[in-house]
Amino acid sequence: MTETLPHGMTPQQALQMMKDDPRTVLVDIRSSMEFLFVGHPKGSVHIPWIDEPDWTINPHFVTDIRKLLLGGSICTIDEGCAPVILICRSGKRSLEAGKALLEADFTRVFHIDEGFEGDLDDDHHRSTIGGWRFRGLPWEQC
């Protein structure tokens, strides 16, 4: 049976997967502005799902992911395929982008369900109740 949803995981599980399987690729799919100015996980690669100036879905997203994995996406019976982990702000865009990868026959697709900044708290602030940054995992800003 083909998966229709990417596997959700916590930021900590994603970091552990990256340590356990060095083929794992963490793709930050947020806009260029978010990636540069809000910060991003160390070691992540930036391929936006939706980006400025038009704020439409990147028509080259799946192709860009394939190019990223070129040479590292060989699937074997023993090791399976290289895992792709997607991260966005709060886990909503990464879920949608993950569906697109699964529809394009990727097999090991994951998404960080808390995202980089997590959901809004009662005061409409992010990074206070969840997310990569809130969990104290390695990140950087440009």
Image (cartoon, helix red, strand yellow):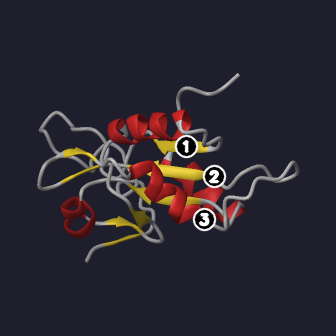
Picture layout, residue 25 above or below residue 124: below
Residue annotated with mark 2: 83
Front one among 43 and 81: 81
Q: Residue at x 47, y 33 (%)?
A: 99
Q: Quadrant of residue 53?
A: bottom left
| Amino acid residing under circle 2 | Pro
Q: CA distance from mark 3 to mark 2?
A: 13 Å
Picture layout, residue 82 above or below residue 56: below
| Amino acid residing under circle 1 | Phe
Give the mark, 1 or 3, whose residue is nearer the N terminus: 3
Asked whether, in this view, residue 34 is left or right of residue 67, the answer is left
Label 3: which secondary element:
loop
Could you tell me if residue 92 is visible in this image?
Answer: yes
| Amino acid residing under circle 3 | Leu
Residue annotated with mark 1: 110
Could you tell me if residue 7 is visible in this image?
Answer: no
Asked whether, in this view, residue 76 is left or right of residue 60, the answer is right
Q: Residue at x 16, y 46 (%)?
A: 55
Residue annotated with mark 3: 70
Q: Of circles 3 and 2, which is in front?
A: 3
Neighbourhood count class around disc 2 (C-alpha, 10 Å): few under 14, some 14–19, many 20 upward: many
Q: Residue at x 57, y 43 (%)?
A: 109
Front one among 55 and 115: 55
Q: CA distance from mark 2 to mark 1?
A: 7 Å
Tell me, yes or no, whether the two marked residues, 2 and 1, touch with CB atoms within 8 Å: yes
User: Where's the N terminus, which quadrant?
Assistant: top right
